[in-house]
Amino acid sequence: VYGTLSQNEIAVRLRTDELEIRFVPLDLRITTLLARDGAESVQRLVERNRPAIDSAGRPAGVSEPGLALVTFFGLQAGVRFDPELLTLTARNQFLRPMAIVPLSPRFGAAQLAARESAMAVYIFEELLPVWEPFTVNYENLASREWERGLPQLQRERDRIAATPR
């Protein structure tokens, strides 16, 4: 049974005049709340990149990493970004990605043209705390959007649980 949410409903956004960042947890506890096409698309993305994800986690002995799809969008020409500056704050802890698996060929260039995007899978040492508030940080920006969306996610989870199989 799938949910009815769209990827936009589980995304956290940060924005400056030059750059927009979109953070989407790639966690089955959340992606199963997506409508079928969205859930399957996300699952295919993870499976297609599973070898790189696994090899990034192996040296640290991490078998069940937290994953997120992060997209940087250029809103102006020549925008520079630093993928290493994106972090999370949860449970009074600072979470940095232990590895980043680029999905876009130009991700490593860290520069975008207007309307260009660069995507990567961010790998964290532990599963993301998707049923608790967390903050997505980039430079001096912070978004608590996840916390505001938790009631909707919980309602969708309850609706799916009540659906006869």
Image (cartoon, helix red, strand yellow):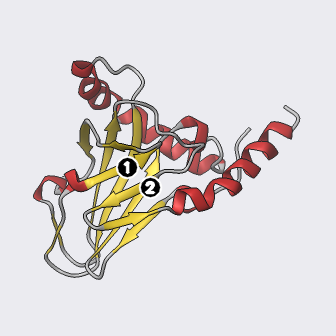
Residue 54: % across, % down: 31, 24
Percent of width and height locating residue 21: 35, 64
Total marks placed: 2
State the residue at coordinates (34%, 21%).
Answer: 62
Callouts 1 and 2 close, C-beta under 8 Å: yes
Quarter of the rendering occupied by the N terminus: top right
In screen coordinates, is 99 left or right of 157?
left
Taking depth in this image into account, of 115 and 100 the one nearest to the observer is 100
Query: What residue is drawn where x is 23% and y is 78%?
Result: 114
Residue 104 visible in the displayed image: yes
Residue 129 on image: x %, y %: 51, 40
Q: Depth check: give the residue in front, 32 or 130.
A: 130
For residue 127, side relative to residue 139 (left or right) = right
For the C terminus, give its image quadrant.
Answer: top right
Residue depicted at 40% across the width and 39% down the height: 67
Which tag, 1 or 2, sits closer to the chain's start? 1
Above/below status of 72 relative to 56: below
Q: Residues within 10 Å of mark 2 (few under 14, many from 20)?
A: some
Mark 1 neighbour class, 10 Å CA radius: few under 14, some 14 to 19, many 20 or more? some
Q: Choose top left, top right, bottom left or bottom right for residue 31.
A: top right
* Amino acid carrying mark 2 in the image: Thr
- From this viewpoint, which residue is outermost toward the top? 61
Say which element carries label 1.
strand
| Quarter of the figure with residue 85 | bottom left
Foreground residue among 110 and 90: 90
Which residue has dot 1 on it?
Answer: 88
- Judged from the image, the secondary structure of the residue bearing numbered disc 2 is strand
Q: Which mark is residue 135?
A: 2
Give the residue type that dot 1 points to. Leu
Position of 134 relative to 118 (above/below): above
